[in-house]
Image: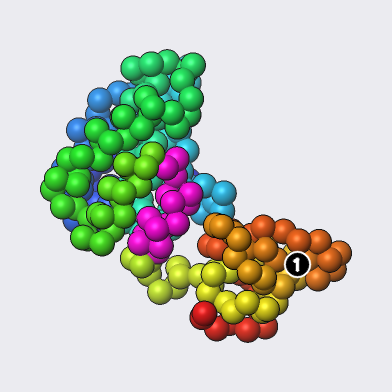
């Protein structure tokens, strides 16, 4: 699935109320192609440097809720702005990108586009300089609260310690204790321990209960 987004009317389908009027001017600053992509497990969106036509390219997953879509779009637009101001030699999520991200986000925070709890999580994430919504567990959980019911998934942190589970329909693991930010889980086939992200999506479990 890949569809080009070329109008304010189309953007309204993906963004929260009140956001289009603030997003539209940002989209017109530079030659830009925005594509709505199929769902990707490893990322919400991406930015690519200008191609031969001189157009920047951004893609965003189609299945994001409006607030996740907006934050992802601002994240990728910050890459575009950082490139335009500083070139390719900067770190992808370094100080230059963080500065651009905060500046782009400020008008949306000032206009109170986000629900209060999510806004607080987003501000905290911006202040901490997190590289993505997925690396900031607090922001990720706040975003998940706005997913449609059919989009909500069972995660490793939802099941009890000792439960068996599968991720990506591969090996079976047994959930162990949480060590810092990840759970120590044992692969039931080879006996090896792996550190599993608490928000890893479970495809099967023998004990789908919340802790």
Quarter location, residue 142: bottom left
Seen as rendered, the residue at the extreme left is 111
Q: Compared to 90, does 175 lie above or below?
A: below
Q: Compared to 171, does 111 lie above or below?
A: above
Q: Is residue 24 visible?
A: yes
- The residue that mark 1 highlights is 186
* Coordinates of residue 32 in the picture (x, y in percent): 35, 29
- 139 drawn magenta: yes
Q: Is residue 22 visible?
A: no
* Coordinates of residue 54 in the picture (x, y in percent): 41, 18
Secondary structure, mark 1, is: strand
* Coordinates of residue 69 in the picture (x, y in percent): 35, 50
Q: Compared to 104, does 12 lie above or below?
A: below
- Residue drawn at x 31%, y 29% is 99
Provide the residue span drawn in magenta.
Answer: 130-144
Q: Is residue 98 left or right of residue 160?
A: left
* Coordinates of residue 196 in the picture (x, y in percent): 64, 60
Q: Is residue 21 left or right of residue 66?
A: left
Residue placed most toward the observer, 37 or 140: 140
Q: Compared to 201, does 8 lie above or below?
A: above
Q: Which of the colour schemes (rainbow, by chain, secondary structure, one colour) is used?
A: rainbow
Q: Residues within 10 Å of mark 1 (few under 14, many from 20)?
A: many
């Amino acid at each position: 699935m890949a569809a080009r987004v070329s109008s304010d009317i189309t953007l309204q389908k993906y963004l929260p109320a009140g956001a289009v009027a603030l997003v539209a001017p940002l989209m017109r600053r530079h030659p830009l192609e925005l594509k709505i992509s199929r769902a990707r497990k490893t990322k919400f969106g991406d930015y690519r440097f200008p191609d031969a036509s001189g157009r920047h390219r951004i893609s965003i997953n189609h299945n994001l809720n409006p607030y996740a879509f907006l934050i992802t779009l601002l994240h990728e637009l910050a890459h575009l702005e950082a490139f335009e101001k500083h070139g390719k030699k900067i770190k992808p999520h370094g100080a230059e990108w963080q500065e651009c991200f905060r500046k782009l986000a400020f008008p949306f925070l000032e206009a109170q586009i986000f629900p209060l709890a999510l806004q607080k999580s987003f501000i905290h994430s911006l202040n901490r300089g997190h590289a993505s919504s997925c690396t900031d567990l607090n922001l990720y959980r706040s975003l998940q609260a706005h997913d449609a019911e059919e989009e909500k998934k069972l995660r490793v942190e939802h099941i009890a310690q000792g439960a068996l589970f599968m991720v990506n329909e591969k090996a079976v693991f047994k959930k162990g204790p949480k060590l810092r930010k990840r759970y120590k889980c044992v692969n039931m086939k080879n006996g090896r321990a792996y550190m599993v992200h608490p928000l890893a999506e479970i495809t099967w479990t023998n004990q789908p209960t919340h802790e």
